[in-house]
């Protein structure tokens, strides 16, 4: 019961984080947060009964940290929409290609790595795109930092949906 997820909202009702019930009860008892919605259930102590919170809101505004994402194969494929950045072929079996080859001083960074099909990767080989007479469909760039990353990676409870509308699939009417 004390490990049930609780949504923490910032002072302006923006989702900030997900914590467990124990942490949420501490924030409530210290007067740092208010209860927005409780879930079904209670915790009984020797002298008190506490409703298990589902959503709490902080009284003070907290700066949301922006985390830059680590470079990964899957991250590059998702950024490039599983599409070869040279010929435009959609595929689930892509390779990574360094736009400026590492042998020529290219770095293993977001703005130098793209998705490529194996035939385009072999055709380009250890050359720059201009040397191989190949053109990139889209210039590579790092993905934008997502301040709601911590909330999105957690299981979303149904009572949280009014505060996280961009993650809720819309029902067709």
Image (cartoon, rainbow, N blue to C red):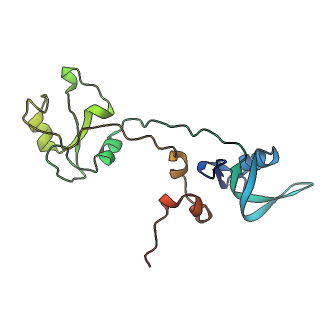
| Rendered residue at 56%/59% (across/down) | 156
Quarter holding the C terminus is: bottom left
In the rendered image, residue 64, in percent from the top left (x then y), is placed at 57, 40
**Number of callouts:** 0
| Rendered residue at 69%/51% (across/down) | 57
In the rendered image, residue 105, in percent from the top left (x then y), is placed at 23, 20
* Quadrant of residue 155 within the rendered picture: bottom right
Classify 102 as above or below 61. Answer: above
In the rendered image, residue 171, in percent from the top left (x then y), is placed at 46, 73
* Quadrant of residue 115 within the rendered picture: top left
Classify 119 as above or below 89. Answer: above
For this view, does 78 lie left or right of residue 50?
left
Q: Residue furthest right?
A: 47
| Rendered residue at 66%/42% (across/down) | 61
For this view, does 163 lie left or right of residue 40?
left
| Rendered residue at 68%/52% (across/down) | 3
* Quadrant of residue 6 within the rendered picture: bottom right
Classify 19 as above or below 108. Answer: below
Q: Nearer the viewer, residue 124 or 64?
A: 64
Quarter holding the N terminus is: bottom right
In the rendered image, residue 136, in percent from the top left (x then y), is placed at 17, 40
For this view, does 21 lie left or right of residue 96?
right
Q: Residue furthest front?
A: 12
């Amino acid at each position: 019961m004390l490990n049930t997820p609780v949504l923490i909202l910032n002072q302006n009702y923006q989702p900030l984080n997900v914590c467990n019930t124990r942490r949420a009860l501490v924030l409530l008892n210290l007067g740092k947060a208010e209860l927005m919605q409780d879930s079904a259930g209670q915790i009984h102590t020797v002298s008190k009964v506490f409703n298990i919170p589902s959503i709490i809101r902080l009284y003070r505004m907290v700066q949301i940290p922006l985390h830059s994402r680590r470079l990964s194969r899957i991250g590059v494929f998702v950024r490039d929409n599983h599409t070869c950045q040279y010929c435009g072929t959609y595929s689930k079996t892509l390779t990574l290609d360094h736009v400026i080859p590492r042998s020529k001083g290219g770095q293993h960074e977001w703005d130098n790595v793209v998705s490529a099909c194996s035939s385009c990767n072999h055709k380009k080989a250890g050359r720059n795109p201009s040397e191989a007479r190949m053109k990139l469909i889209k210039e590579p760039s790092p993905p934008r930092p997502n301040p709601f990353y911590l909330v999105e990676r957690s299981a979303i409870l149904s009572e949280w949906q009014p505060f996280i509308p961009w993650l809720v699939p819309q029902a067709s009417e």
